[in-house]
């Protein structure tokens, strides 16, 4: 993620009153101490009003049931009115880049339909051999019995390659996708105007680069990549420049940090629970369930935000029109009433792992979920074929943010089992 060391010229100051149940504090993710406040929220206040936070007042929705209710009422709880993260839009340093994740019906429906064909089961079948070949190449190039960073060498490399293929993006420039995605998805920038301006500049660079790719495909025969699909679709063909860039950034960010952090979680999490790793090594038939379980356990996006479009009641709490709600998937995926008392553990054969909310729920449920699952499954399968075990040899460095939930660095060695 982007964390240039720039003097802070922030107008977002730490709240005068420290609320221990303010789960938007980045340090609880950096230090991995988020479990306890969420346990309390689920038990004591499943819909909780936090008055004082660096992001202003917001409601925390922390249980499985509460989030399903909010996501099932997309007209009442809007993705468009205030955006999809707890950080508000600032007109001075942000440019509105409309993207369909932050649109309501009916516009959302048309734009989502345009990219959905890139993620059908038949498309996944078509892509599997290629994903397997690239995964094999990355794994075969790893040094055995020597320390390296799993995040950069495996997780970032594999997800970036995938995006380059999806966009038919120039191969040698593919790390630009990682760079732009890291800037776009870093909501901590909200607190620093200088960094926000830098972000804006990078988004313009990204836009100009994609505009060039777009221009090269205009008037040409359709090709099976997302840019061509967008050009040849009814809903998106008439998009303005900002909408085009917004939707591309959505796909880059959507497919990047999330899958990357699941791939890092599989290395870190299986090392943390060696009995479960042994179970998986003994029975590769469990891989598909393990993928769901790892995504549940990690929850690569800790929250999504909604804004109430009318006064309403949610689980006994009075919500006012315009109120901001954070749906904490990270907490719902630990909900004892759904996943039991051992929800903090990875259990590779957990019977209901598939019920996890890491991909959201309802009309905005992740359109790329199948692709993410496929990439993670192929990685586990190819590790199994090589009898490759990842040993974590030092503490991970975690992302300090309440949106992207993941790892910056994970020192590992690999060996045979
Ligand atoms: C939406 C998570 C992978 C593209 C979402 C949402 C979540 C999510 C939580 C929003 C749901 C909501 O607002 O209700 C994840 C996770 C992933 C992943 C955990 C990996 C483990 C991907 C991939 C792509 C992608 C690989 C594409 C390449 C999108 C898009 C949306 C979305 C375009 C917007 C859908 C809509 O608004 O209708 N994802 N995602 N995601 N994701 Fe993913």
Image (cartoon, grey):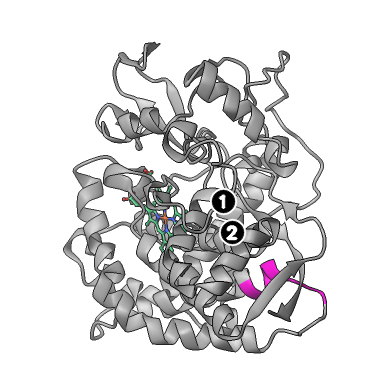
Per the picture, the main secondary structure of the magenta-coloured stretch is helix
Q: Is residue 227 left or right of residue 17?
A: left
Give percent across and percent down for residue 205. Answer: 55, 64
144 w.r.t. 95: above or below? below
Is the CB of the residue bearing disc 2 within 8 angstroms of ligand 1? yes
292 w.r.t. 286: above or below? above
Q: Is residue 85 left or right of residue 264?
A: left
Give percent across and percent down for residue 101. Answer: 36, 48
- Figure quadrant of the C terminus: bottom right
Instruction: Quote the CA–CA distance across marks 1 and 2.
Output: 8 Å
**Residue annotated with mark 2:** 261
Q: How many neighbours does mark 2 have within 10 angstroms: few (below 14), some (14-19), or many (20 or more)?
A: many
* Label 2 residue SS: helix
Is the CB of the residue bearing disc 1 within 8 angstroms of ligand 1? yes
- Residue 177 or 144: which is nearer the viewer? 144
- Residue 189 or 205: which is nearer the viewer? 189
The magenta span reads: 147-154
Q: Is residue 359 magenta?
A: no
Give percent across and percent down for residue 225. Answer: 34, 77
What residue lies at 48% left-to-right and 29% top-to-bottom? 62
Disc 1 vs disc 2: Cβ atoms closer than 8 Å? yes
**Residue annotated with mark 1:** 298
What residue lies at 24% left-to-right and 62% top-to-bottom? 114
């Amino acid at each position: 993620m982007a964390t240039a060391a720039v003097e802070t010229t922030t107008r977002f100051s730490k709240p005068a009153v420290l609320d221990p149940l303010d789960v938007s504090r980045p340090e609880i993710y950096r230090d991995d101490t988020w479990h306890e406040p969420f346990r309390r929220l689920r038990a004591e206040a499943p819909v909780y009003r936090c008055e004082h936070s660096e992001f202003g007042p917001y409601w925390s929705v922390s249980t499985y049931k509460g989030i399903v209710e909010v996501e099932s009422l997309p007209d009442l709880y809007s993705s468009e009115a205030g955006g999809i993260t707890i950080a508000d839009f600032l007109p001075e340093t942000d440019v509105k880049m409309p993207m369909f994740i932050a649109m309501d019906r009916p516009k959302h429906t048309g734009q989502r339909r345009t990219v959905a064909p890139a993620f059908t089961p038949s498309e996944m079948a078509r892509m599997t051999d290629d994903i397997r070949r690239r995964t094999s190449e990355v794994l075969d190039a790893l040094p055995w019995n020597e320390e390296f960073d799993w995040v950069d060498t495996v997780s970032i490399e594999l997800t970036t390659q995938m995006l380059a293929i999806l966009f038919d993006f120039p191969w040698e420039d593919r790390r630009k996708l990682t760079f732009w995605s890291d800037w776009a998805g870093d909501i901590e920038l909200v607190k620093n105007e200088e960094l926000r301006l830098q972000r804006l500049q990078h988004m313009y660079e990204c836009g100009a680069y994609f505009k060039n790719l777009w221009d090269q495909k205009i008037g040409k025969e359709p090709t099976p990549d997302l840019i061509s699909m967008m050009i040849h679709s009814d809903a998106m063909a008439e998009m303005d420049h900002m909408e085009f860039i917004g939707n591309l950034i959505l796909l880059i960010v959507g497919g990047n940090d999330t899958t990357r952090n699941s791939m890092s979680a599989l290395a870190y999490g299986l090392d943390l629970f060696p009995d479960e790793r042994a179970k998986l090594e003994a029975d590769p038939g469990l891989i598909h369930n393990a993928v769901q379980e790892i995504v549940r356990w990690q929850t690569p996006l800790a929250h999504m935000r909604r804004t109430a479009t009318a006064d309403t009641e949610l689980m006994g709490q009075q919500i006012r029109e315009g109120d901001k709600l954070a749906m904490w998937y990270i907490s719902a995926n630990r909900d004892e009433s759904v996943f039991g008392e051992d929800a903090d553990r990875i259990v590779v054969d957990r019977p209901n792992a598939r019920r996890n909310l890491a991909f959201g729920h309802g009309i905005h449920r992740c359109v790329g979920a199948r692709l993410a699952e496929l990439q993670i499954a192929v990685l586990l399968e190819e590790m199994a074929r090589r009898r490759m075990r990842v040993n974590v040899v030092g503490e991970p460095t975690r992302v300090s943010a309440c949106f992207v939930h993941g790892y910056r660095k994970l020192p590992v060695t690999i060996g045979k089992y």
